[in-house]
Image (cartoon, rainbow, N blue to C red):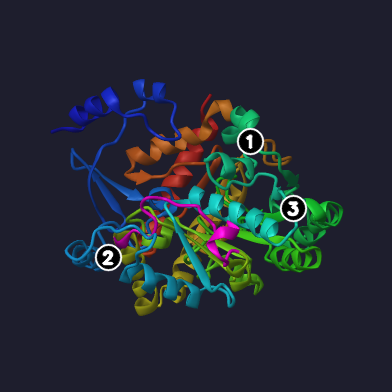
Amino acid sequence: MSNTDWIARDLAHLWHPCTQMKDHEWLPLIPIRRGQGVWLEDFSGRRYLDAISSWWVNLFGHCNPRINAALKEQLDTLEHILLAGFSHEPAVLLAERLTALAPKGLDRCFYGDNGSSAIEIAIKMSYHYWRNRGYSAKRRFVTLSNSYHGETLGALAVGDVPLYKDIYQPLLMETITVPSPDCFYRAAGESCRAYTERRFALMEETLAREAETVCAVLIEPLVQCAGGMRMYDPIYLDLLRKACDRYQIHLIADEIAVGFGRTGTLFACEQAHIRPDFLCLSKGLTGGYLPLSAVLTTEDIYQAFYDEYHTQRAFLHSHSYTGHPLGCRAALASLDIFEQDQVIVANRDLAATMHEAAAPLADHPHVAEVRQQGMILAIEMVKDKANRTPYPLEERRGLVVYQHALQRGVLLRPLGNVIYFMPPYVITEEEIHFLATVAGEGIDLASASH
């Protein structure tokens, strides 16, 4: 069957995520037949370089032979069993591996199905912990402006991207929003570290004032991904950890997008040498193969729920596919690759190549900034470079880049006016330079349109 045939069958029944479906009257869907490494192939044989790791999940390329082999072996052994009252080898092994790799003291692992589920688990667990400990006034959460933590109602409530949140506001719990330390807004000549440190004063004031009613602060360490790949200095994490300790408030680190090597270390929190009270993981956890999430937490938090049944203190959150054997086995295979191939070290060279390839774009008359944190690089298009006036979002300049990139055989999916690279770690230096060339061409077209 052809691309056209599959598109017609798709549009007859499927409703796609994060999509205005009417766009597909003029913007063709791309049905993918197979993937290999960083490349995807449609039903006409046309190939696309997956520059965004298929929504930030794919770490070691499509159809990775080592992950494939692990899953085939698991499939012939055990496909699924409930994790209530039962256990299985992959869930135990993965919990052991994750707690050994995470910041010291995160000794307990609770599984979920996806990133939003991980956030829901963490906020429920934090609230429930304080309730079990007798702090019934603690029932609110603090979050940063421009943050994103998922799309289920609890996760949406603790985020702050209006595009996703505003329409559902009447359904959401009230949260406290503190201005972000986003270094895009630092003064001319001001270092990112100085700006980040200065912005922390706003968080300090909020926690000092609201501590008695706050369960936890949620944060995306180092990079606010869905908020436009905005970045800040690790000093914020250090200051926040100390403040949360002072005011008896939990720290929830949302490393769903930034974990597993994306920022240059296995976990972003490592760059501030801190341990959160909850570490939320998903996306790259399984190497991009299967939905799975994990919330790592402390023995103290675990013990707050450990009691006789009749006390009704247990954490009764559950998903049917919690700790799915296939997902856990894919995650174990992914962690094996990290260990055997010294991926974090190898990524330093790839990150340096990304920096070199994209650096010339900083001089583009409609680029305000090229910023990078490890294997995440973002290029911010603007209408006026001098005063950083953004293009109106309704002009959809990023869509011009997206369309051009597809014509050139690259999957780039901008966040509004922000073009970003977040490729699988098996990308080559030549392919990185190709990405930068295509992005530059697209930015030229987008800034000349209208």
In this view, the mark in front (1 or 2): 1
In the depicted structure, whether residue 31 falls above or below residue 12: below
Q: Taken as a whole, is the magenta stretch helix, strand or loop?
A: loop
**Is 45 contained in the magenta span?**
no
Residue at image position (69%, 56%) is: 131
**Is 323 contained in the magenta span?**
yes
Residue 241 seen in this snapshot: yes
Marks 2 and 3, the one that precedes in the sequence: 2
Question: Could you tell me residue 231's position as x and y percent?
Answer: 64, 55
Residue 163 - label: none
SS of the residue under disc 2 = helix
Marks 1 and 2, the one that precedes in the sequence: 2
Amino acid type at mark 2: Ile
Q: Residues within 10 Å of mark 1 (few under 14, many from 20)?
A: some
Query: Contact (CB < 8 A) between labels 1 and 2?
Result: no
Residue at image position (33%, 38%) is: 407
Magenta span covers which residues?
305-325
Front residue of 287 and 7: 287
- In the picture of the structure, the residue carrying the numbered disc 3 is 136
Using the rendered view, name the quadrant where residue 5 is placed: top left
Amino acid type at mark 1: Leu
Residue 172 - label: 1
Question: Could you tell me residue 2's position as x and y percent?
Answer: 16, 32
Q: Is residue 381 left or right of residue 15?
A: right
Direction front: furthest residue: 310
